[in-house]
Amino acid sequence: MDPLTDKQAIRNLRQDYQAARLELTDTDPDPLRQFDRWLQEAIAADLPEPNAMILATADPAGRPSARVVLLKGLGPEGFAFFTNFLSRKGRELDLNPHAALVFNWLELQRQVRIEGTVGRLPEAEATDYFQSRPKGSQIGAWASEQSSPVADRKLLEQRYAELEERYASQDRLPRPPHWGGYGVRPTRIEFWQGRPNRLHDRICYECQTDGSWTRQRLAP
């Protein structure tokens, strides 16, 4: 068996961040507007999949799991994404409606961390988005029982081919009942900007009981 990556080589991987700075006075009082500003800058910088985010969930016992999903909506209610309700993340969110998100824009030396409560999006919104997706993605959502064991990839491909034939004359498929959207309503959002000597800038927003936001600088 080949040895694992040399421990010292991993320890020596580091970068001194000098791309930008983040002052409290430069941030928007509304963290969603601040996030939108950073997202637009990530898009303008032509980063690969700037809407990719790590979604962390936990089961009722508190055991966490994490994966990368795509942000598909941003508004006053928070951050929207779509998935199979029967997947592991869907089952965990239905039992424990709390989640954390992380956006990591390495090229800009930026990170955004979000914590909040989660609820399902309206069915009409889920259907509208589902039918706007490429046809292949619509068929894939029907073909895959996400997170369930599958004996062979050929079974998935066979199921896909059967559905492709069934819906050959349709471009907009019906939305599967097990597929829809979630919205993460944020209670805490932290903006991180890498700085030299690991003295990074961290600006944290906390949602208050009246819906307003406070913000403060955190030590790195």
Image (cartoon, helix red, strand yellow):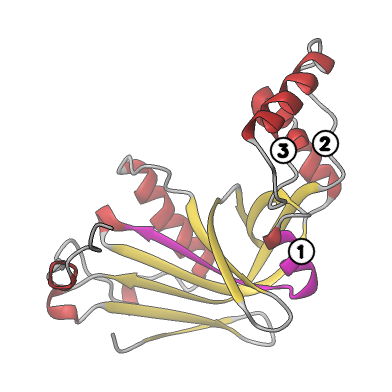
Pointer 1 residue: 91
State the extent of the magenta-drawn residues as a range: 90-105
Which one is in front in this view, the residue at disc 2 or the one at disc 1? 1
Classed neighbour count for the residue bearing mark 2: other residues with Cα under 10 Å, few (<14), some (14–19), many (≥20): some
Label tally: 3
Nearer-the-camera pick, 119 or 147: 147
- Kind of residue indicated by mark 3: Tyr
Q: Quadrant of residue 64?
A: bottom right
The residue wearing badge 3 is 129
200 sits to left or right of 153:
left
Which mark's residue is nearer the viewer, 3 or 1?
1
Pick the front one: 18 or 92: 92
Q: Is residue 76 left or right of residue 188?
A: right
Mark-to-mark CA distance, 2 and 1: 19 Å
Furthest-top residue in view?
169
Mark 3 neighbour class, 10 Å CA radius: few under 14, some 14 to 19, many 20 or more: some
From what the image shows, is residue 211 above or below residue 183?
below
> Closer to the N terminus: mark 2 or mark 1?
1
Q: Quadrant of the N terminus?
A: bottom left
Find out whether residue 142 is within the magenta segment: no
Distance CA(mark 3)–CA(mark 1): 21 Å
Q: Amino acid at mark 2?
A: Arg
